[in-house]
Image: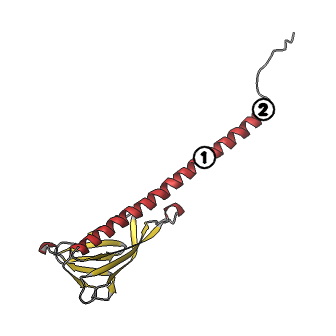
Protein backbone atom coordinates (compact mmCIF):
# COMPACT_ATOMS: atom_id res chain seq x y z
CA UNK A 1 0.00 0.00 0.00
CA UNK A 2 1.45 3.30 -1.13
CA UNK A 3 0.60 6.33 0.74
CA UNK A 4 1.37 9.70 -0.76
CA UNK A 5 2.94 11.90 1.71
CA UNK A 6 3.04 15.63 1.56
CA UNK A 7 6.70 16.35 1.18
CA UNK A 8 7.84 19.89 1.65
CA UNK A 9 10.90 21.19 -0.15
CA UNK A 10 12.19 23.52 -2.80
CA UNK A 11 11.86 23.06 -6.48
CA UNK A 12 14.92 23.42 -8.63
CA UNK A 13 13.68 26.76 -9.94
CA UNK A 14 13.20 28.14 -6.41
CA UNK A 15 16.65 26.99 -5.40
CA UNK A 16 18.28 28.61 -8.45
CA UNK A 17 16.40 31.85 -7.83
CA UNK A 18 17.48 31.88 -4.17
CA UNK A 19 21.14 31.23 -5.06
CA UNK A 20 21.06 33.97 -7.73
CA UNK A 21 19.60 36.56 -5.36
CA UNK A 22 22.08 35.67 -2.62
CA UNK A 23 24.98 35.88 -5.08
CA UNK A 24 23.93 39.38 -6.15
CA UNK A 25 23.58 40.50 -2.53
CA UNK A 26 26.99 39.06 -1.59
CA UNK A 27 28.67 40.63 -4.64
CA UNK A 28 27.20 44.03 -3.78
CA UNK A 29 28.32 43.67 -0.14
CA UNK A 30 31.87 42.67 -1.05
CA UNK A 31 32.13 45.51 -3.58
CA UNK A 32 30.81 48.01 -1.04
CA UNK A 33 33.29 46.96 1.66
CA UNK A 34 36.15 46.87 -0.86
CA UNK A 35 35.38 50.45 -1.85
CA UNK A 36 35.26 51.52 1.79
CA UNK A 37 38.63 49.90 2.55
CA UNK A 38 40.25 51.46 -0.53
CA UNK A 39 38.89 54.90 0.42
CA UNK A 40 40.13 54.52 4.00
CA UNK A 41 43.64 53.59 2.85
CA UNK A 42 43.67 56.50 0.36
CA UNK A 43 42.55 58.95 3.05
CA UNK A 44 45.22 57.67 5.45
CA UNK A 45 47.88 58.20 2.77
CA UNK A 46 46.68 61.75 2.14
CA UNK A 47 46.56 62.53 5.87
CA UNK A 48 50.05 61.11 6.42
CA UNK A 49 51.57 63.28 3.67
CA UNK A 50 49.66 66.40 4.75
CA UNK A 51 50.49 65.99 8.45
CA UNK A 52 54.18 65.22 8.00
CA UNK A 53 54.62 67.86 5.30
CA UNK A 54 53.03 70.56 7.46
CA UNK A 55 55.09 69.49 10.46
CA UNK A 56 58.36 69.55 8.49
CA UNK A 57 57.52 72.92 6.96
CA UNK A 58 56.62 74.41 10.36
CA UNK A 59 59.90 73.19 11.86
CA UNK A 60 61.99 74.70 9.06
CA UNK A 61 60.13 78.03 8.98
CA UNK A 62 60.23 78.41 12.77
CA UNK A 63 63.97 77.73 12.75
CA UNK A 64 64.46 80.37 10.03
CA UNK A 65 62.41 82.92 12.01
CA UNK A 66 64.60 82.44 15.09
CA UNK A 67 67.90 82.40 13.14
CA UNK A 68 70.38 85.26 13.28
CA UNK A 69 71.97 84.64 9.87
CA UNK A 70 71.86 82.40 6.82
CA UNK A 71 75.09 80.63 5.88
CA UNK A 72 73.92 78.60 2.88
CA UNK A 73 72.58 79.12 0.33
CA UNK A 74 74.23 82.46 -0.32
CA UNK A 75 72.14 85.58 -0.89
CA UNK A 76 70.11 85.33 -4.12
CA UNK A 77 71.13 81.67 -4.40
CA UNK A 78 69.36 78.37 -3.99
CA UNK A 79 70.32 74.88 -2.98
CA UNK A 80 69.21 71.58 -1.52
CA UNK A 81 70.64 72.35 1.92
CA UNK A 82 69.97 75.16 4.41
CA UNK A 83 72.44 76.23 7.08
CA UNK A 84 71.46 78.91 9.59
CA UNK A 85 73.05 80.33 12.70
CA UNK A 86 70.68 80.26 15.68
CA UNK A 87 70.98 82.11 19.03
CA UNK A 88 71.47 78.91 21.06
CA UNK A 89 75.17 78.11 20.64
CA UNK A 90 74.71 74.36 21.25
CA UNK A 91 72.28 74.21 18.31
CA UNK A 92 74.31 76.38 15.98
CA UNK A 93 74.70 75.92 13.12
CA UNK A 94 71.43 74.23 12.27
CA UNK A 95 71.45 72.36 8.97
CA UNK A 96 68.46 71.02 7.03
CA UNK A 97 69.14 68.65 4.14
CA UNK A 98 67.89 65.57 2.37
CA UNK A 99 69.40 62.20 3.22
CA UNK A 100 68.05 59.81 0.60
CA UNK A 101 64.33 60.60 0.77
CA UNK A 102 64.21 61.73 4.42
CA UNK A 103 64.50 65.31 5.67
CA UNK A 104 67.21 65.61 8.31
CA UNK A 105 68.13 68.30 10.82
CA UNK A 106 71.57 68.63 12.36
CA UNK A 107 71.87 71.01 15.29
CA UNK A 108 75.38 71.99 16.34
CA UNK A 109 77.67 69.04 17.05
CA UNK A 110 74.76 66.61 17.51
CA UNK A 111 74.11 63.84 15.02
CA UNK A 112 71.67 64.43 12.19
CA UNK A 113 68.11 63.35 13.01
CA UNK A 114 65.38 62.47 10.53
CA UNK A 115 62.31 64.69 10.86
CA UNK A 116 60.08 62.53 8.67
CA UNK A 117 58.93 58.95 9.10
CA UNK A 118 59.55 56.05 6.74
CA UNK A 119 55.93 56.29 5.54
CA UNK A 120 56.72 59.33 3.40
CA UNK A 121 59.45 60.34 0.98
CA UNK A 122 60.71 63.75 -0.08
CA UNK A 123 61.61 63.61 -3.74
CA UNK A 124 63.01 67.13 -4.09
CA UNK A 125 63.74 70.09 -1.83
CA UNK A 126 64.86 73.62 -2.66
CA UNK A 127 65.92 76.42 -0.34
CA UNK A 128 66.02 79.89 -1.95
CA UNK A 129 67.77 82.71 -0.13
CA UNK A 130 65.74 85.77 -1.11
CA UNK A 131 67.80 88.18 1.00
CA UNK A 132 68.61 91.54 -0.56
CA UNK A 133 70.99 94.16 0.74
CA UNK A 134 69.47 96.19 3.54
CA UNK A 135 66.88 93.52 4.42
CA UNK A 136 66.75 90.76 6.98
CA UNK A 137 67.21 87.23 5.73
CA UNK A 138 64.31 85.68 3.87
CA UNK A 139 64.23 82.03 2.83
CA UNK A 140 61.71 80.26 0.61
CA UNK A 141 61.37 76.50 1.16
CA UNK A 142 59.79 74.17 -1.39
CA UNK A 143 59.62 70.39 -1.35
CA UNK A 144 57.63 67.52 -2.84
CA UNK A 145 56.49 64.83 -0.42
CA UNK A 146 54.84 61.58 -1.39
CA UNK A 147 53.54 58.55 0.42
CA UNK A 148 55.94 55.60 0.42
CA UNK A 149 54.47 53.12 -2.07
CA UNK A 150 56.90 50.27 -2.81
CA UNK A 151 54.25 48.02 -4.40
CA UNK A 152 52.74 50.78 -6.59
CA UNK A 153 49.19 50.38 -5.31
CA UNK A 154 46.95 53.15 -6.61
CA UNK A 155 45.32 53.74 -3.22
CA UNK A 156 48.72 54.62 -1.68
CA UNK A 157 49.78 56.90 -4.53
CA UNK A 158 49.66 60.50 -3.30
CA UNK A 159 52.09 63.40 -3.43
CA UNK A 160 51.93 67.09 -2.62
CA UNK A 161 54.17 70.11 -3.08
CA UNK A 162 54.73 72.26 0.00
CA UNK A 163 55.97 75.85 -0.29
CA UNK A 164 56.56 78.43 2.40
CA UNK A 165 58.80 81.33 3.30
CA UNK A 166 60.02 82.96 6.47
CA UNK A 167 61.93 86.07 7.47
CA UNK A 168 64.60 86.01 10.14
CA UNK A 169 64.04 87.86 13.38
CA UNK A 170 60.24 87.54 13.50
Q: Quadrant of residue 68?
A: bottom left
**Residue 54 shows in the view:** yes
**Circle 2 sits on which residue?**
14
For the point 48% across and 56% down, the residue is 41
**Residue 112 shows in the view:** no
Question: Which element is circle 2 on?
Answer: helix
- State the residue in front, 49 or 139: 139
The reply to whether the C-beta atoms of the residues labelled 1 and 2 are less than 8 Å apart is no
Q: x, y (%) of residue 165?
A: 33, 76
- State the residue in front, 6 or 22: 22
For the point 44% across and 69% down, the residue is 160
Please tell me which of labels 1 and 2 falls first in the chain: 2
Q: In what quadrant of the picture does the N terminus appear?
A: top right
Vertical relation: 97 (above or below) 114: below
Q: x, y (%) of residue 27?
A: 65, 46
**Circle 1 sits on which residue?**
30
Q: CA distance from mark 1 to mark 2?
A: 24 Å
The crowding category of the residue bearing disc 1, from other C-alpha atoms within 10 Å (few below 14, some 14 to 19, many at least 20), is few
The crowding category of the residue bearing disc 2, from other C-alpha atoms within 10 Å (few below 14, some 14 to 19, many at least 20), is few
Q: Quadrant of residue 11?
A: top right
Q: Quadrant of residue 135?
A: bottom left
Amino acid sequence: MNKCSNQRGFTLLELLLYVSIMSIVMLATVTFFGTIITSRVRNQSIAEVNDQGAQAMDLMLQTIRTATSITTPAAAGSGSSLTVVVPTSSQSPTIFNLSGTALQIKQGAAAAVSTTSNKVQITSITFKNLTRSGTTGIVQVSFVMKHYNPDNHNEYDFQRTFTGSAEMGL
